[in-house]
Amino acid sequence: MEYHMEDKMSILKELQEQRTDVVSKLKRIEEKKSTVSVEVYEKVRKEYADKLKGIEEKLSEHIDLLTEEVQRLKAQEEDILKQKKDTKFKMEEVELRYSIGEYDEDSFNKVKQENDASVKQFDEDLKKIRENMSYYSSLMTSKEPEPKPTPAPTKAAEPEAKLEIDEHILEEKLPEEEVALEELLSEEEAVKPEVTTEAPAKPEPMKDQGVTCPKCGHVNTADSWYCEKCGAEILGASESS
């Protein structure tokens, strides 16, 4: 079924009003979140979130219409800006002519009031047009297909995997390396020259250690004739013995 432009705009306007109402209710639900149980909050919030999703899906079916409407509002904005600029120039001219006496005070005030009212209306119209343009543009932007996330390159993970394998291999080879080290130490021990431990040389008996007294047993120096202790003659005694 084909719709005329006016019918399409009527549908679009109705969807916009529905969306505004649902968004407003969702905001109030968030404000009341702390006053109800989690179960109730989640249930009601999901209900209105689903409604909003449905409305936006319907709006997405009219992207072409939204585009046309934005273009129309843009042209309307440019036209109002031109009228506002012309009104401003006209008022400047009136002020100049009033300053040189072409207008009396009553006539000048009347023209000024009319121009001020026109400028105020232009500003209100521009505000409304720009709000609608922003709203339509946001709908169009929100319905643009989102770019698919680029899968992360698998090569980045290869160094880490390789490192784990290397460590595993090293762990497996560790016992073999220990055996090789033990064998090497054994070989080194085998080639070391044998060190024989020699018994300390016995001290040779000292010659002429002294002369023992035959009477008291005191050891006197070798050249002693008499015992240093008892006075007995020892040199002659030793020679006779």
Image (spheres, rainbow, N blue to C red):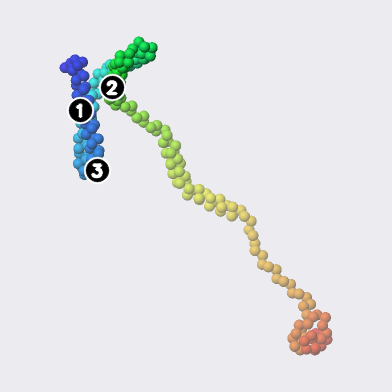
Q: Amino acid at mark 3?
A: Ser
Q: Residue at x 38, y 14 (%)?
A: 99
Q: Are marks 2 and 3 in contact (CB under 8 Å)?
A: no
Which tag, 3 or 1, sits closer to the chain's start?
A: 1
The relative height of residue 25 versus residue 139 in the rendered view (above or below) is below
Which tag, 1 or 2, sits closer to the chain's start?
A: 1
Q: Residue at x 65, y 63 (%)?
A: 197
The relative height of residue 156 versus residue 65 in the rendered view (above or below) is below
Which residue is labeled 3 in the image? 34
Q: Amino acid at mark 1?
A: Gln
Q: Nearer the viewer, residue 182 or 169?
A: 169
Residue 78, visible in the rendered structure: no
Give residue 18's mark: 1
Task: Pinpoint residue 162: horizontal percent, then vertical percent.
Answer: 44, 38
Q: Residue at x 31, y 27 (%)?
A: 146
From the viewer's perspective, is the residue at label 1 or at label 2 nearer? Answer: 2
Q: Quadrant of the N terminus?
A: top left
Task: Pinpoint residue 36: horizontal percent, then vertical percent.
Answer: 21, 43
- Label 1, label 2: how far apart the Cα atoms are: 24 Å
* SS under mark 2: helix
* SS under mark 3: helix
Q: Which image quadrant for residue 211?
A: bottom right
Q: Residues within 10 Å of mark 2 (few under 14, many from 20)?
A: few
The relative height of residue 42 versus residue 58 in the rendered view (above or below) is below
Report whether 7 appears left or right of 153: left
The relative height of residue 23 versus residue 121 in the rendered view (above or below) is below
Q: Residues within 10 Å of mark 1 (few under 14, many from 20)?
A: some
Which residue is labeled 2 in the image? 124
